Image (cartoon, rainbow, N blue to C red):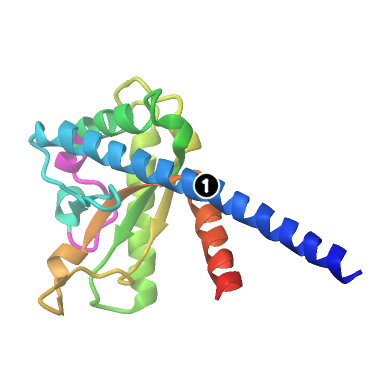
């Protein structure tokens, strides 16, 4: 009957709203988790001599590629190696500590290039550089640190070519665009974003 259909629809809607309320609570939690992790990273690295930039919104950490690589090379330079040996233990001491590790889905090393040359050539270069960094971190003779035996299940390498250039005054800043970034992805972020989009569609 019309009435039982209506009450079923109302129940379904109530359930969807409940799911969304839960999702929004989770999203708030995730925003808080990310904010806390970013705060911890900023605290940690403001005391170090490492030259890096931390994105206050995402927590991505950016190194200019001159630190790790010579132009067009994919071999990590010796001072780049020293940098990584200082940076990695500190970075993972925050991301994989007991408070944070259960929220972390993935830690991504990203290579980025400038816009000279073809997209494909740069894709290969950026991919190989990201891979070189990950390979260096995962090698057996990398100095021991607290979470060394855990990191391989989180770490992944991506090349982005020049798809995400850094702009200065509306112009591509080639020097800044050539960089290596360390990013982290939290669990449930994608699911929650999808749920929000679905809900926005059903409500419009």
In this rendered view, identify the residue nearer to me: 70 or 176. 176
Q: Where is residue 151 in the image (x, y as percent from the top left)?
A: 43, 32
In this rendered view, identify the residue nearer to me: 90 or 193. 193
Q: Residue at x 14, y 40 (%)?
A: 79
In this rendered view, identify the residue nearer to me: 5 or 153. 5
- Magenta residue check for 176: no
Q: Crowding near pointer 1: few (<14 within 10 Å), some, many (20+)?
A: some
Where is 193 relative to 76, above or below? below
Residue 107 seen from this side: no
Residue 14 is left or right of residue 26, and the answer is right
Q: Which residue lies furthest to the right in this view?
A: 1
In this rendered view, identify the residue nearer to me: 119 or 184. 184
Q: Position of residue 44 (x, y in %)?
A: 18, 31
Q: Where is residue 24 in the image (x, y as percent from the top left)?
A: 48, 50
- Quadrant for residue 39, please give it: top left
Q: Which residue is drawn at 26% across and 66% down?
A: 113
- Quadrant for residue 121, please give it: bottom left
Q: Where is residue 49 in the image (x, y as percent from the top left)?
A: 7, 35
Residue 96 is left or right of residue 166, and the answer is right
Residue 48 is left or right of residue 14, and the answer is left
Residue 68 seen from this side: yes
Q: What element carries label 1?
A: loop
Q: Which residue is drawn at 28% across and 52% down?
A: 181
- Quadrant for residue 5, please give it: bottom right
Magenta highlight range? 71-82
Give the tally of numbered discs. 1
The residue wearing badge 1 is 188
Position of the N terminus, as image quadrant, is: bottom right
Position of the C terminus, as image quadrant, is: bottom right
Q: Residue at x 50, y 35 (%)?
A: 153
Q: Which residue lies furthest to the front in this view?
A: 3
């Amino acid at each position: 009957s019309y009435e039982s259909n209506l009450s079923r629809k109302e129940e379904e809607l109530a359930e969807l709203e409940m799911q969304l309320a839960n999702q929004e609570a989770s999203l708030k939690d995730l925003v808080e988790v990310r904010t806390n992790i970013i705060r911890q990273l900023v605290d940690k690295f403001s005391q170090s001599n490492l030259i890096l930039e931390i994105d206050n919104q995402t927590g991505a950490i950016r190194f200019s590629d001159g630190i790790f690589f010579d132009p067009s090379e994919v071999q990590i330079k010796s001072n780049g190696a020293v940098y990584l040996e200082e940076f990695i233990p500190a970075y993972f001491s925050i991301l994989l500590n007991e408070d944070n590790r259960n929220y972390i889905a993935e830690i991504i090393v990203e290579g980025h290039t400038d816009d000279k040359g073809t997209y494909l050539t740069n894709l290969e270069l950026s991919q190989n550089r990201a891979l070189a960094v990950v390979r260096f971190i995962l090698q057996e003779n990398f100095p021991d640190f607290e979470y060394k035996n855990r990191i391989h299940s989180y770490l992944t390498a991506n090349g982005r070519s020049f798809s995400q250039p850094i702009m200065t005054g509306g112009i591509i800043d080639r020097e800044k665009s050539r960089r290596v970034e360390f990013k982290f992805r939290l669990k449930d972020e994608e699911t929650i974003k999808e749920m929000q989009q679905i809900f926005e569609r059903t409500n419009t």
